Image: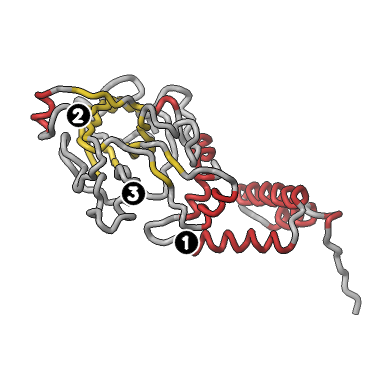
Amino acid sequence: MSVNVKDFGIENMPEAVLEEYGAKTKDPRTREIMLSLITHLHSFVKDVKPTEEEWFKAITFLTAVGHKCDDVRQEFILLSDTLGVSSLVDSINHDRSGVGTENTVLGPFYVPGSPEMEMGSSIVQKATEEGETAVANGTVYDNNGNPLAGAVLDVWQSSSEGFYHMQDENMPDFNLCGRFTTGEDGKYIFVTEKPAAYPIPTDGPVGDMLNACGRHPMRPGHLHFIITAPGYDRLVTHIFTNGDEYLDSDTVFATKSSLVGEYKETNDEALASELNIESPFLKVDFDFTLMPS
């Protein structure tokens, strides 16, 4: 009994693979993605010509990335972030053409469930010695410049020591986190600490990759926001800290000049009394604009 055997090798790769997937993948979008992936992956392999040892090392690296993931640590997001892919995907999906507030990456340390808070509350449950009291203040607008009532601001940040609440066993759950809902005036205000620059986790395979490539692990200081309102696109964004030395070399390639806020010292005694903080304090004024869904 004769059996037809097809020879596979450099001469007919990736064409033979593309033919197989192209003919048998029914969903059009899945077919488009798979054919592009195969084309670029084969092109990469032909260009780099990895040894078998190098290819196995790559597989081992990806395996280690998966093993480092758990319910509070997503090493694959960290890998995507540090390769600039998260920022690119974000830009492709959220190009607001200069009208709405710009999006940026979510990051690997967002945890749903931040406590609901009244406007003017402090998200600082446990202060750090280095922390500088700061007030974040502004207005959420619609795309026509009208104040937006009922917008929910989900806020989180790292401490001035560079840790998020789930990373530091000495920090209370949801320290430096909170959810605020705007009233008819669209305004928001809360008390926090001025965000400081901090390193992303380097105790895993992504840290090893950065070290091998001579890259630093630092992110400029920033406040995280997810802002939602019925009928409007979800906004995932930051307020970056002005003057931070890492604004031009963010390790996850997520900075945007439009998202830099200026922290100014103020002696507003009336506001300090209202917020139950000492004066002087730092204040950053920053408005957000949401776009219709």
Q: CA distance from mark 2 to mark 3?
A: 23 Å
Figure check: 23 above or below 93: below
- Residue drawn where x is 57% and y is 59% of the image: 62
Question: In the image, which disc is placed on residue 68?
Answer: 1
Q: CA distance from mark 1 to mark 3?
A: 18 Å
At 47% from the left and 34% from the top, the residue drawn is 94
Give residue 163's mark: 3
Q: Nearer the viewer, residue 27 or 257?
A: 257
CA separation, marks 1 and 2? 40 Å
Amino acid at pointer 1: Lys
For disc 2, the marked residue is: 281
Front of the two marks 1 and 3: 3
- Along the line of sight, the residue nearer the viewer: 282 or 288: 282
Q: SS class of the residue under badge 3?
A: loop
Residue 169, horizontal then vertical, whole percent = 28, 58
User: Image quadrant of residue 261?
Assistant: top left
Give the amino acid at mark 3. Answer: Phe
**Is 233 left, or right, of 204 in this rendering?**
left
| Residue type at numbered disc 2 | Phe
Disc 3 packing (10 Å; few <14; some 14–19; many ≥20): some
Tell me if mark 1 has few (under 14), some (14-19) or many (20+) residues whose alpha carbon lies within 10 angstroms of its own. Answer: some
